[in-house]
């Protein structure tokens, strides 16, 4: 009897320990597997995967630095692994390699390699097509209609990841490019500020879009609600009203600016009083007068329809981001493979 109780207690301790490890690892990033190649060392792999040797050893329970060719290593990365597909983008008048690269969140170098464009050749011919690798399922999503009257076809579901927590997965369906930007931008914020609480992701859309009470929008997978970042909080379960006293202005602005740099944002709805705080911080960070004018509605008045960041009632406890439609509505799918992607694919 005593032996049975001892075994039961030991099993419970092991289960609790394993659960604790899985939660800790989930907070560290997305799980990937790396196969050791000839000439690999822990330091080389750590440098390649942007992590420390200490973490590599902990994740894989290694007691020494010895590796063997073919050995599988578990690595937790801020860059997710998702299916990739190749689309054909028709070049528009005024396009350049750098403009197209920013549209799709890839590097100029990758565009050259995928399309065998020699270095030094920068002129593009309107009407011709480029092959571009984009993340997402084999059947790409389609957004129909307007955010206030639309639907979502082949939507993709967002799940919690490093730096963010999805409040309700059933209400977190979006267009592929929206999910991509959320999965790449928010881990960058987490990497910059290790001690911040995870950003809470609220509603995006239903699986097939359509009416989504109490929202008037959120119907075609392009709208996302997310929390502000607050001072002195390690865990945030739901949206919390932001004030001058509790808003972490530096971290919240870093998050907003990270999204703005994707050039994929149509509007951001932020309470007008909070806009003032963010505006002054951006100005102190070196934003030019022209850039401030393009970005903020403030200080022109909450009724003015100017700027990307605008006031809307009931946005004191969350930010509402509206993404632009996908830049490839007419893209043709060529093939599919799995790959690791980030803001600069290669």
Image: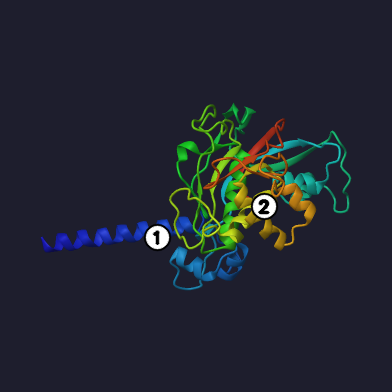
- Can you name the residue that lies furthest to the left here? 1
Q: Quadrant of the N terminus?
A: bottom left
18 shown above or below 57? above
Residue 47, by quadrant, is: bottom right
The residue sitting at 76% across, 37% down in the picture is: 89
The residue sitting at 69% across, 53% down in the picture is: 344
Q: Position of residue 119 (x, y in %)?
A: 85, 53
Q: Position of residue 218 (x, y in %)?
A: 56, 34
Q: Position of residue 193 (x, y in %)?
A: 56, 63
> Earlier along the polypeptide chain: callout 2 or callout 1?
1
Q: CA distance from mark 2 to mark 1?
A: 29 Å
Q: Which residue is mark 2?
A: 343
Residue 21 disc label = 1
Q: Considering the numbered disc 2 on the image, is that residue within a helix, a strand or a loop?
A: loop
Can I make out residue 37 in this image?
A: no
Q: Position of residue 192 (x, y in %)?
A: 59, 62
195 shown above or below 257? below
Q: Is residue 167 left or right of residue 284?
A: left
Q: Is residue 333 left or right of residue 244?
A: right
The reply to whether discs 2 and 1 touch (Cβ–Cβ < 8 Å) is no
Can I make out residue 187 in this image?
A: yes
The residue sitting at 53% across, 33% down in the picture is: 215
């Amino acid at each position: 009897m005593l032996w049975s109780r001892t075994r039961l207690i030991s099993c419970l301790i092991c289960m609790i320990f394993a659960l604790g490890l899985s939660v800790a690892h989930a907070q560290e990033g997305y799980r990937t597997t790396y196969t050791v190649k000839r000439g690999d060392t822990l330091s080389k792999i750590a440098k390649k995967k942007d992590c420390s040797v200490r973490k590599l050893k902990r994740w894989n329970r290694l007691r020494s630095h010895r590796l063997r060719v073919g050995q599988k290593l578990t690595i937790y990365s801020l860059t997710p692994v998702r299916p990739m597909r190749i689309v054909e983008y028709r070049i528009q008048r005024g396009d350049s390699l750098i403009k197209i690269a920013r549209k799709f969140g890839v590097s100029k170098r990758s565009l050259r390699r995928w399309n065998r464009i020699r270095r030094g050749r920068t002129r593009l011919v309107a009407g011709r097509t480029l092959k571009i690798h984009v993340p997402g399922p084999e059947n790409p999503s389609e957004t129909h209609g307007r955010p206030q009257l639309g639907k979502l076809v082949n939507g993709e579901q967002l799940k919690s990841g490093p730096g963010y927590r999805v409040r309700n997965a059933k209400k977190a369906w979006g267009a592929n490019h929206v999910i991509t930007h959320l999965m790449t931008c928010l881990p960058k914020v987490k990497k910059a500020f290790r001690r911040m609480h995870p950003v809470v992701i609220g509603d995006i859309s239903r699986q097939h879009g359509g009416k989504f009470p109490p929202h008037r929008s959120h119907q075609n997978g392009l709208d996302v609600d997310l929390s502000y970042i607050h001072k002195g909080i390690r865990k945030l379960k739901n949206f919390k009203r932001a004030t001058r006293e509790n808003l972490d202005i530096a971290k919240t602005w870093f998050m907003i600016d990270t999204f703005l740099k994707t050039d994929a944002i149509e509007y951001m709805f932020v309470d007008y009083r909070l806009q003032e705080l963010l505006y002054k911080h951006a100005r102190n960070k070196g934003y030019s007068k022209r850039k401030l004018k393009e970005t903020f509605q403030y200080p022109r008045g909450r009724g003015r329809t100017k700027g990307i960041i605008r006031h809307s009632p009931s946005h004191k406890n969350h930010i509402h981001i509206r993404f632009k439609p996908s830049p490839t509505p007419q893209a043709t799918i060529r093939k599919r493979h799995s790959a690791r992607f980030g803001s600069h694919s290669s």
